Amino acid sequence: MRTWLVLAAVSAVAAVAAADALRGGLRDRGQAAAAQAERRIVPPGVPAGSMGTVFYSDPSEGCRLRSLRLAGFTEAQPPSYDECRFSLSPDGTKAAPEGSVWSPLGGVVAVPREDGFSLEAGPEQTIVVRGRAPAFKPDGTLTQVRDGKLVGFDIDCEPGERLFTLPADNATARCAHIVYPHPLASTVWFSATRFAAISRASRLLIVDDGRVVVRTHLLPYRTAALSISPRRTFVSIWIDGDLAGTFDAKGGPVVMPPLAGVHALAWSPTERWALLATERGGVYLFRPATGDARVRRLDISARDVAWR
């Protein structure tokens, strides 16, 4: 089994000194320089609108959702929502509370509740589900932790098994099968067989077809969660609300800019660009493969960000 060195301690220590210098240096350029940097974020020859739309919660307007209107971005009407933290649907037309998980096929969202979570497909299509840690596979299959095990709802059922129907699922009969026989606190799927998870024993796991291929202990924390990029290439780990590290499907680390206090991350649909929002409200655009030399601070302030 390969051991992956978790980035939590490294990023927390290495970023502090560099972060203030980086933030200060970018601020000192003034508004004219900021506008010039914004124009440079689109590579030469890229058609306008090809970079999609960035949505962000604007703290100066009570965290109202807004969309970014810069060269290279399309203009889209953001959904009406005024919570500082949000979860945006794949098509960018709906927003749900922080921690909600959307099906990659769109339409269905798992919204956390005190006693489990609810599956919602509209005002008239909501069911309350017993369990924790909802997640969706790339094909839209729902998985969750129930009775101490990770289970998935499949259409291949044995005679006599209990059947379920889910909202907006065309009344398809499904049954629950055990995917991983141990409790997990957070799960995201790279593929139909490979997932990353945080265990109840404070370990970060990567599991492929039921077999643990990467395991590492995490530093002490109060809360921990995982998020995944649009093409399911990269997973980020959040410790007590801050970004602690990003890794790929093999557990290899992804180099991120040396910014402290990052509490929101949004990948472009192609995963060639990404945005980071810090606890001070700064928003930074960067190319993950090129290091911090290509970081640009945008002339907006945000509590949360999404990219569609």
Image (cartoon, grey):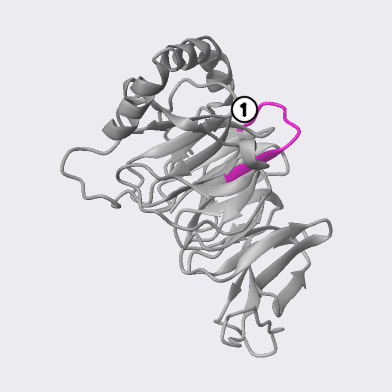
**Looking at this rendering, what residue extends furthest in the bottom direction?**
159
Q: Position of residue 1 (x, y in %)?
A: 49, 39
**Residue 260 in view in this figure:** yes
SS at badge 1: loop
Q: Is 91 inside the magenta-drawn segment?
A: no
Highlighted range, magenta: 217-226
Identified at 50% across, 22% down, the residue is: 259
Q: Relative to 291, does residue 305 appear above or below in the rendering?
A: below
- Residue hosting label 1: 279
- The local crowd at label 1, few if under 14, some if 14 to 19, many if 20 or more residues have their Cα within 10 Å, is some
Q: Position of residue 84 (x, y in %)?
A: 66, 43
Q: Work out whether residue 113 or residue 20 is closer to the camera in this orientation and state it.
A: 20
Q: Overall secondary structure of the magenta stretch?
A: loop
**Residue 206 in view in this figure:** no
The kind of residue on which mark 1 rests is Glu
Q: Relative to 116, does residue 8 appear above or below in the rendering?
A: above
Q: Position of residue 52 (x, y in %)?
A: 36, 52
Q: Work out whether residue 259 or residue 180 is closer to the camera in this orientation and state it.
A: 259
